[in-house]
Amino acid sequence: MGIRVLVVDDSALVRSVLRDELQRAEEIEVIAAVSDVYAARDRIVIDKPDVITLDIEMPRMDGVEFLRRIMPQYPVRVVMVSALATAHAELTLQALRYGAIDFVTKPMARNGASISNMVDELVEKIRAAAKVDIARHNTMREKSVVTGVRNFALARSTDKIIAIGASTGGTVAIESILKQMPPDTPGIVVVQHMPPVFTKQFADRLNAVVPMEVKEAESGDRIHRGRVLIAPGERHLSVMRSGGAYMVRCYEGDKVNGHRPSVSVLLASVAKHAATNAVGVMLTGMGADGADGMLAMRN
């Protein structure tokens, strides 16, 4: 049985493109394409789609507000469709906190190649979303953790690193985990599959709600207790040793396992430079990214 998808977008052109392109994908069946959230609500209640794609900007009620209202009554797997802009990045991260599983960004250029790449990514994320236990996902999202006083540790040499890799559903999982960490937790480095702008917004959001310092990583940043470094979008993040301290390097490069930043790049560098002084954590996956890096750390 295929993955039954509901497309929600106010643009007739986008609805047509998504409906036609998704229908061509193996395992996916588009049951409807509607123009606003009120029609979407009716379809969700009647047809019970496996996954819906939801635009941020919608008439009468935006996608984020709709998500906030619909999730408590009719939990559904949602992949958001967002513009690549600062304002939309903030709204998209709100959507993830309200229960959306993942998102894709609309292409800046309206050429065939850009649209095709976006659709390919959307297909991949729809397939991943369809496998998510939505009840468990929402339980984790709603979990409230009381954090202690923010008490950043002084930068100092450390021989321990926690390296975290995540993709679909990872933003919610990462926030849930970091909220439970004490302020003097060993330095944490994170690769979350996410485009530029979104990674900065994500880091800023975490910095406001967890007991450690969180920032989007820059080359030369020191890894130390009480600090979390998030890989910037479209940049690989690797760990290197400088004397008794660990530091990070952010750089452009070819995509690895189809991703930049790549979890495997991070974990391979941790295996090389930190070895048994590090712990590797794979929260969620997208394709094979992270698998060989975890093996390198294990070995």
Image (cartoon, rainbow, N blue to C red):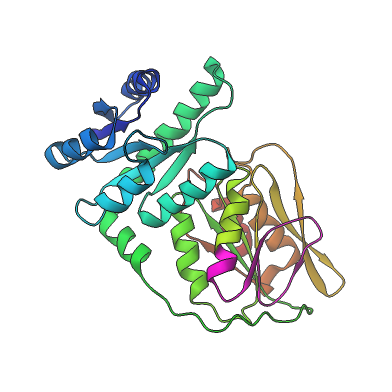
Residue range highlighted in magenta: 206-228
Q: Residue at x 34, y 66 (%)?
A: 142
Instruction: Please indicate, yes or no, whether residue 18 appears anywhere in the rendered image.
Output: yes
- Judge from the rendering whether residue 201 lies leftward or rightward of residue 242; answer left or right: left
Viewport quadrant of the C terminus: bottom right
Residue 287 in the image: above or below residue 7: below
Residue 170 on image: x %, y %: 47, 56
50 drawn magenta? no
223 drawn magenta? yes
Residue 42 in the image: above or below residue 11: below
Q: Residue at x 75, y 64 (%)?
A: 273
Residue at the far right: name it: 243
Residue 220 on image: x %, y %: 82, 60
Q: Residue at x 44, y 53 (%)?
A: 94
Q: Residue at x 51, y 45 (%)?
A: 288
Residue 247 on image: x %, y %: 78, 64
Residue at the far front: name it: 60
Residue 266 picture quarter: bottom right
Instruction: Please indicate, yes or no, whether residue 280 appears anywhere in the rendered image.
Output: no
Residue at the far top: name it: 112
Viewport quadrant of the N terminus: top left
Foreground of the two, 58 or 126? 58
**Callout count:** 0
- Judge from the rendering whether residue 231 lies leftward or rightward of residue 176; answer left or right: right
